[in-house]
Amino acid sequence: METKNQTNDVGPGRSNLLHVAIIMDGNGRWARKRDRPRLYGHRAGLEAVRHLVSCAPKHGIKHLTLFAFSTENWRRPRPEVEGLFALLQEYVKKETAKLVEQGVRVRFLGERKGLPDTAKKIVDRCEHGTAQGSRLNLNIALNYGGRSEILHAVRKVAAKVEKGMLKAAEIKATDFESQLFTRGLPDPDLLIRTSGENRLSNFLLWQLAYTELHFTPVLWPDFKEEHLVAALSDFRQRERRFGAIANKG
Ligand code: FPP
């Protein structure tokens, strides 16, 4: 029988180098409070990303996964969508050399096919340019949706069954996980969502099964190292049981 510990690095005894995932929410409200356009908030949000990337490793974070653009975000007004992609382009252009210097390896999670051609090029260039980084893995979820990721993986596994490469009854969680955008990454230990919204919004639905959740009212552009420290300290008070019983000796 398969146990949960056989799946993607879940369970007690794993490394204490953390995987932190963040839903960076509240850019629009931050801008509105200042009577400025939404893109002003996204630009400030990008500053918060820069700040966090530079301080994450010293807090024991090895993997940082940021929700930058969801499959649902295409429904936003066109100028906002274009502005977000322009910001991403600017970030990659200006920042790749610094990311290399900081030992950051960038990977993008999400459906590449749906991206504009310029964004596809930028994404590839950034991944190749930072591939040697080993201090921090920065995963940027772009055109990402948890349900479509699961469907995509199901189709891949089903195709293997159809071809006779795998028996349906013998499908293991690892067969499935190897088809996710997050293949090779441990599941997040901690999910932070800013701006006071308490939901997952279709983010990493499979991967968050045993993740500790931390919700903070701070709007993303205001999220600083002190807020990260508070989230990590909250996380360290949690008793993670992974479905087992409390270990009280
Ligand atoms: C949610 O706030 C934020 C986003 C949809 C975009 C996040 C993007 C960035 C922080 C900048 C680019 C990042 C990278 C990694 C290059 P919202 O607009 O939903 O805010 P609201 O709920 O207050 O309206």
Image: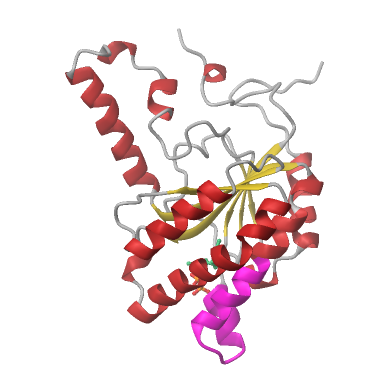
Provide residue 12's location: percent of width, then percent of height: 68, 23
**Quarter of the image that includes the C terminus:** top right
* 11 in the magenta segment: no
| Residue drawn at point x = 32 percent, y = 45 percent | 148
Provide residue 168's location: percent of width, then percent of height: 26, 15
**Quarter of the image that includes the N terminus:** top left
Provide residue 88's location: percent of width, then percent of height: 50, 66
Residue 156 visible from this viewpoint: yes
Relative height, residue 183 to residue 164 (above, below): below
Q: Number of numbered discs present?
A: 0
Residues rendered magenta in the picture: 27-48
Provide residue 51's location: percent of width, then percent of height: 72, 64
Judge from the rendering whether residue 106 lies leftward or rightward of residue 111; answer left or right: right
Relative height, residue 1 to residue 174 (above, below): above
Judge from the rendering whether residue 15 lies leftward or rightward of residue 122; answer left or right: right
The kind of secondary structure the magenta stretch mainly shows is helix
Residue 219 visible from this viewpoint: no
* Camera-nearest residue between 248 and 96: 96
* Camera-nearest residue between 34 and 135: 135
* 34 in the magenta segment: yes
Relative height, residue 226 to residue 83 (above, below): above
Q: Residue 133, located in which quarter of the rendered image?
A: top right
* Camera-nearest residue between 195 and 222: 222
| Residue drawn at point x = 39 percent, y = 73 percent | 81
| Residue drawn at point x = 50 percent, y = 37 percent | 207
| Residue drawn at point x = 44 percent, y = 69 percent | 85
Judge from the rendering whether residue 126 lies leftward or rightward of residue 236; answer left or right: left
